[in-house]
Image (cartoon, rainbow, N blue to C red):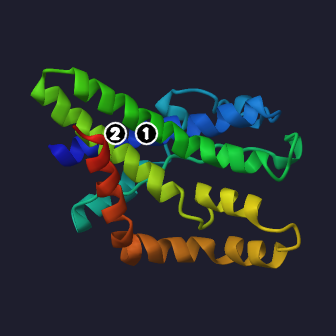
Amino acid sequence: MSDLIFFLFIIIGAIIHEYAHGWTADKLGDPTARNAGRLTLNPLAHIDIFGTIILPFLMVLSFGSAFGYAKPVPYNPYNLRNQKIDPALIGLSGPLSNLILALIFTLIIRLSPYSTLNLILSLGVLANLALLIFNLIPIPPLDGSKLLYALLPADSWRLKASLEKYGIFILIFFIFSLSRLISPLIFWCYQLLMP
């Protein structure tokens, strides 16, 4: 039962994460997400059949833990006011939304006398911390790569091209073999927040 609740919090967190990307891009001058009908919290607009349903289900069956993603919100960097910094702000907005959700759930837990509610919300804290930390890894197509690109010098196009070309393979390798490296960080942050 706790796996199902955790999975639901992953879906909710991923949808809000993608909405935050679209909202930020819209505020920075790019209406692509709004025009595509993605500037909404309606789950149907963000669900990716494979990434949101099939992959997490298979991972729970195989590994006992879920990984998934929502359909990425599109944006056009040429519509942005600052084409170096604004993509990083858009990238950062998704993980920031997960941090805010984790903090809101933590606040409710600290104020609530109901142990069942607190147990459920603690899974929400954990799910959103996992989304936050995982998405900050600087591997394309994760949000951390947008932050990395903003920090790299303008003439580092070869490195960017290599990361874009091989990023998905690095990410798959990371998910299935190196993800244990970030688990201690996720649980350390969780223990830091929980009462």
Tag 2 secondary structure: helix
Q: Where residue 166 appears, x then y in whole percent?
A: 64, 77
Q: Kindly identify the residue that appears in the image at 43 percent across and 39 percent down.
A: 13
Image quarter of the C terminus: top left
Q: Is residue 12 left or right of residue 117?
A: right
Q: Amino acid at mark 1?
A: Gly
Q: Which residue is mark 1?
A: 13
Tag 1 secondary structure: helix
Q: Is residue 95 above or below residue 41?
A: below
CB of mark 2 within 8 Å of CB of mark 1? yes
Q: Is residue 70 left or right of residue 64?
A: right
Numbered label attached to residue 9: 2
Image quarter of the N terminus: top left
Q: Is residue 36 above or below residue 169?
A: above
Q: Is residue 158 above or below residue 68?
A: below
Q: Kindly identify the residue that appears in the image at 48 percent across and 72 percent down.
A: 172
